Structures are given as structure tokens and as C-alpha cells.
Image (cartoon, rainbow, N blue to C red):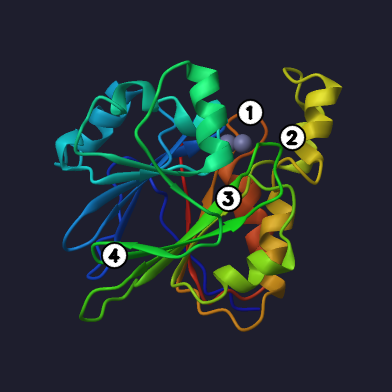
Amino acid sequence: MVIFCVFSLLGTAARFLLVALEFDMLGSGSSGNCGLIKTKDAVFLIDAGFSCKRIANMLAERNTSLDQIDAVFITHEHTDHIQGLRGLRKYENIKFFANRDTAEVIEKKFNFCIPWQIFTTGERFSLGDLRVDSFSVPHDAADPIGYVFSFAGRGGGYIKSIAWMTDLGYIPSHVSRDVAGVDLLIIESNYDNDLLTLDTKRPPYIKARIRSRYGHLSNEAAINFIKNSSGNQWKKIVFAHVSADCNSESSIKKLLGESGMFKFEVDIARP
Ligand SMILES: [Zn+2]
Ligand SMILES: [Zn+2]
């Protein structure tokens, strides 16, 4: 069996250089998540799961500064997605996008105000040459969502649309439909079943929460979804939100190898 599967590990130096949308995972794992999207006109963050200082350092490594960030799109209120907001809110150039329930829970959690740009989940809006769609995901948060970002400007490009779907216990059919048409799929691949079972740091109730329908996606669930999806247009797939304790790159690669032929370029994000 031939496996057309190209690996390139997404470290701090690696990135996708794309004409329409440039995507770079600053970091993704159980301890923090933050993605960077650049278009011709603007620069965006998806989640802010590291301290503001660390995000600034990650951006500096990419010749980008916080003064250039136009907006942050928040998926949900868990700490590994929002801890940078405390510092980022002081930057007047940044717009903060979230749905209402998520924004309210974050303000209660932090006890400070953020000048939110509130949107309704599922409501399409544009920001410069970026079109933004969102969809609900099953996860134990107030109103957790995933995003589809599409290039709305003129001209072509290898990657013109990106879906971000992490922090979900399973993949409902509306999510499969929403992400089928994108060029770059960022999908959670949180844990290896055996490694989670053997883990000694997490008590049984935490393991049950991770495995629940409102927890996280396992390697198996993510890869089965990709394998069994028909009608998708993906060119690249990034496995994200990979647990440092209960997962490994070799485990993901092994499952991918067993799953048969892939036509996609595949990357594994690092925390
Ligand atoms: Zn998370
Ligand atoms: Zn979460």
C-alpha cells in the first residue's frame, strides 16, 4: 500500500508561506494554543493561550510584533486558549472577537473588561480580506466554537481557507460539513488511548472528562474522521492540541501509517 503522506514537524521555525492566507501555529497543546494568520492586509491570532510576553516572543521570532495584530478570535474560555488576554487587552490595535457567553465567562474569570466584538455563533462577518465563519463544537465550555477563515480578497493562492477545530469530544455532522471545503484543516488529536490509560498524573474523573463527548478528540477519532470523510477538499492537515503527557508524534504517525493512503500533507503541531 502506498502512503502519500508528507510529514514536516511544525516547530517554532516552520511555517506555511502562502499567497492568500499564511498560517503559522505559534504553539498548540494542552498548556496553550495560539495560531497566526496573515493576509495581504492584516494579521490575526486564533486564541491567545500563552502569556502575552510569550506570544510577543513567538511573534518576534517571525518578525511580527503585537502592534501589528489586528484581531484575536477566541474559541472558548479555557485557560489554554485565553491566558494571553490579560496583557493583550492593553493593545488598542487589537480587536477581540468572541460570542457572548464566552466573553461573559472570560470577564468573570479574569475580573476585568475587554472591549469585545461580539458575534453570534454561525453568523458570517468579514474583517478586511478575511471572511470569518464559526460553528458550535461539543466541549465542556459555555459556548465553544471552531472557525473557518476564508480569503475574501482578489487573486489566488494555494491555501485560501482554513478550519480550526480543537477542543471537541466528537465531530458532529454539521462540523464535518463546515470543514469539508477548506484547504487547510487544523484538527485536534489530543491523546493516545493507551497513553491516557497509563498516565499517572490525571485522576480517573479527569480521564473520563477527556474521553467524554464534551472532552477532547483522540488520535483514533481524528484519523478515522479524516479517513472516512468524503467530498473534502483538504490539501494540508495539521494535528493540534496534542497532549504532552498522553500522546506522542510516533503514535499519531503509526495510526496514520495504518490508516492507508493519504493524499494530504500532514503536520503535527508542537506545544
Ligand atoms: Zn484546549
Ligand atoms: Zn477546552
Give the label on residue 145, or none.
Answer: 3
Q: N-terminal of the two: label 4 or label 2?
A: 4
Asked whether the residues under the numbered discs 4 and 2 touch, taking CB atoms below 8 Å apart as contact, a structural biologist would say no
* 74 lies left or right of 179: left
Q: What's the CA distance linking mark 4 and mark 2? A: 35 Å
Q: What's the CA distance linking mark 1 and mark 2? A: 8 Å
Circle nearer the viewer, 3 or 4:
3
Q: What's the CA distance linking mark 3 and mark 2? A: 27 Å
The residue drawn where x is 62% and y is 51% is 252
The residue drawn where x is 46% and y is 46% is 269
**Ligand 1: which quarter?**
top right
Q: In what element is the residue under mark 1?
A: loop
Q: Which amino acid does the dot numbered 3 rest on?
A: Ile
The answer to whether residue 101 is above or below residue 260 is above
* 136 lies left or right of 110: right
Residue 251 position within the rendered picture, expressed as x and y whole percent measured from the top left: 65, 47
Q: What's the CA distance linking mark 3 and mark 4? A: 21 Å
Which residue is denoted by mark 1 in the rendering? 245
The answer to whether residue 40 is above or below residue 78 is below
Circle nearer the viewer, 3 or 2:
3
Residue 194 position within the rendered picture, expressed as x and y whole percent measured from the top left: 79, 38
